[in-house]
Image (cartoon, rainbow, N blue to C red):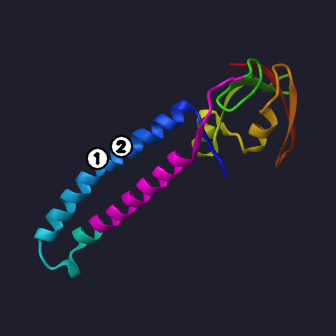
Amino acid sequence: MKKYFTPEGMKKLKEELAYLQTTKRKEIADSLEKAIAFGDLSENAEYSEAKEAQAFVEGRISELEELIKDATVVSANPKKGWAQIGSVILASMDSKKAKAEEFKIVGAEEASPLEGKISVDSPLGKAFLNKPEGAVVEVDAPAGKIKYKILKIK
């Protein structure tokens, strides 16, 4: 399955990978060295904790390397005025009292609803994708169907 990232999302992945490969690995190596100096490793809690941290960091490094290798970086708005991955969409629910909300369509790995970043694979992301400004989209939600009007695409 393809993984899509905005340029900002890819930059964050690469920064995290660099941090883990340099700073965090060094910190863990130092912790292991100190723990080994205590002697008897079979009953050494510090050693066990450092080994667990090392396993977690190495797992995350592998995961990030795989994500970066298989990623497709998508620039925003290849078609001006149409919702694409990377687009920022100003939309309002089909209601007189609804205020406009801003959404950014991102790859699943970057999604953060609290920050207004919605996954291209989410029901709302799928509804917005490849729609022009002015379009009304319908989304199936637990509370029923919700309509959004796309007011502006940046």
**In the rendered image, which residue does mark 1 sit on?**
22
Q: Which mark is residue 18?
A: 2
The part of the image, by quadrant, that contains residue 60 is: bottom left
Residue 20 at x, y = what percent? 35, 49
The part of the image, by quadrant, that contains residue 133 is: top right
Task: Name above or below for residue 88 compared with residue 127.
Answer: above
Q: Label 2 sits on what residue type?
A: Ala
Q: Which mark is residue 58?
A: none
Residue 107 is a magenta residue:
no
Q: Is mark 1 on a helix, strand or loop?
A: helix
Residue 27 at x, y = what percent? 24, 53
90 left or right, relative to 35: right
Magenta stretch mostly in which secondary structure? helix
Residue 41 at x, y = what percent? 19, 78
Q: What element carries label 2?
A: helix
Task: Name above or below for residue 81 compared with residue 42.
Answer: above
Residue 62 is a magenta residue:
yes
* Magenta residues, start to end: 50-78
Q: Label 1 sits on what residue type?
A: Thr
User: Mark 2 Cα within 10 Å, few/some/many (few <14, many 20+)?
Assistant: few
Closer to us: 53 or 113? 53
C-alpha span from label 2 to label 1: 6 Å
User: Mark 1 Cα within 10 Å, few/some/many (few <14, many 20+)?
Assistant: few
Q: Which residue is drawn at 23% across and 70% down?
A: 47
Q: Residue at x 43, y 40 (%)?
A: 14
Q: Which residue is drawn at 28% across and 71% down?
A: 48
152 left or right, relative to 40: right
Task: Name above or below for residue 115 compared with residue 41.
Answer: above
The part of the image, by quadrant, that contains residue 144 is: top right
Whether pointer 2 and pointer 1 mark residues with C-beta atoms closer than 8 Å, the reply is: yes
